[in-house]
Image: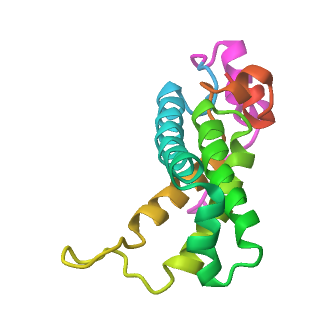
Amino acid sequence: MPDATQTARFSHETEATPRERSRRGDAPARAPAAGPGPLADLGLLIARALVGFVMAAHGWQKVFDVGPATFGTSTLEPLGVPVPTTMGYVVAFTELIGGLLLMAGLLTRLAAFALIVDLAFAVALLKSKAPLIVAPDQPGSGLELDLALIGGFAVALLAGPGRVSLDRVFGIDARRRGGG
């Protein structure tokens, strides 16, 4: 009585990789996957440009409309932030320069990290008790914008700037340098 199960016999033919089989003519050759295509890079560019623009606009307002020292004394000092005037300058220029760097895709991961820290402190200090979305009849804003921006910064930090960036031109982002 023959065995009900049969074990496939392994040989050099069955152990060959697809590349080896294609060299021998056993299977059609296929190009190896080279990672995300151009649409992923376009998505990174759009996301980077949008969240960078929003943060640069917030920084512009703090630097040129309100003034970093005034922002520090009027907003940060009542919250108990130490050296509020200095921190006003740090926040204002982090948002302005970080946003511009993100838009350009220059030092992308560093800028994204700095902006995540900036907004994490803003959420913790200013909006820790705010709802996700403030009712239309209530003043102020909720957490939704801050969380969406942090999400965009996290994408830039973790995925990198993409191919359309100054990081790519200058060879700064080593993860993307070798690909496509």
Whether 39 is drawn above or below 48: the answer is above
Whether 25 is drawn above or below 149: the answer is above
Residue 30 counted in the magenta span: no
Which quadrant holds residue 84? bottom right
Whether 175 is drawn above or below 64: the answer is above
Q: Which residues are magenta?
A: 1-29
Q: Nearer the viewer, residue 40 or 103?
A: 103
- Render colour scheme: rainbow
Classified by dominant secondary structure, the portion drawn in magenta counts as loop
Q: Nearer the viewer, residue 102 or 100?
A: 100
User: For the N terminus, which image quadrant?
Assistant: bottom right
* Position in image of residue 150 (x %, y %): 54, 60
User: For the C terminus, which image quadrant?
Assistant: top right
* Position in image of residue 164 (x %, y %): 59, 24
Residue pictured at 57% horizontal, 50% vertical = 59
Residue 122 seen anywhere in this rendered image of the structure:
yes
Residue pictured at 66% horizontal, 37% vertical = 101
* Position in image of residue 49 (x %, y %): 51, 36
* Position in image of residue 148 (x %, y %): 45, 59
Q: Nearer the viewer, residue 168 or 56?
A: 56
